[in-house]
Amino acid sequence: MRAVNIAELKNRLSHYLQGVQRGEELVIRDRERPIAKIVPLIHADDYEAEEAELVAAGILRLPKTKKLPAKFWREKLSPVRLKRAVKAVTDERDED
């Protein structure tokens, strides 16, 4: 983890943000006293290796949030469709 004073951060902001994009954490200091921390939004450890490779290749974009949209929760499935959906998910899980 790197630490930088405010004046240095202002002068070389792009440089420090590039480090954050690579996964580094940055502590911001005001007169040598830590006041804030900049961390990457997405940690590579949170995702499977395959997803990380696809992201690096520009094939996949990760979601900005892990929450499902409200529309998903409002949609009603008939009992038959729900049973099929659950079976499809469990079958896919069991294949792995």
Image (cartoon, rainbow, N blue to C red):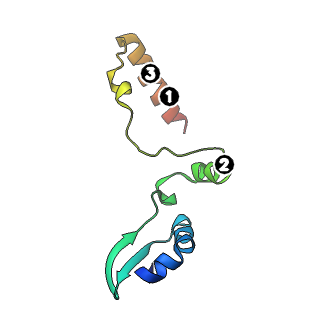
Residue 9 image label: none
Q: Position of residue 84 (x, y in %)?
A: 45, 17
- Which residue is label 2 attached to? 58
Q: Is residue 5 above or below residue 92?
A: below
For disc 1, the neighbor class at 10 Å (few under 14, some 14 to 19, many from 20) is few
Q: Earlier in the sequence, mark 3 or mark 1?
A: 3
Labelled pair 3, 2 in contact (Cβ < 8 Å): no
Task: Identify the residue at image location x=34%, y=16%.
Answer: 76
Judged from the image, the secondary structure of the residue bearing numbered disc 1 is helix
> Whole-percent x and y of residue 23?
52, 67
Give the label on residue 91, or none.
Answer: 1
Q: Check whether the beta carbons of the residues at disc 3 and disc 1 lie within 8 A of each other.
A: no
Quadrant of the rendered image containing residue 77 = top left
Q: Distance between the residues labelled 2 and 1?
A: 29 Å
Q: What's under tag 2, amino acid-wise? A: Gly
Residue at 44%, 21% in the rendered image: 85
Would you place residue 16 above or below residue 80 in this image?
Answer: below
Please indicate whether residue 35 sits to the left or right of residue 26 in the image: left
Q: How crowded is mark 3: few (under 14 residues within 10 Å), some or many (20 or more)?
A: few
Residue at figure coordinates x 50%, y 71% from the top left? 24
**Could you say which is closer to the camera, residue 75 or residue 27?**
27
First in residue order: circle 2 vs circle 1: 2
Q: In which quarter of the image is residue 36?
A: bottom left
Say which residue appears at 55% left-offset and 35% top-offset.
Answer: 95
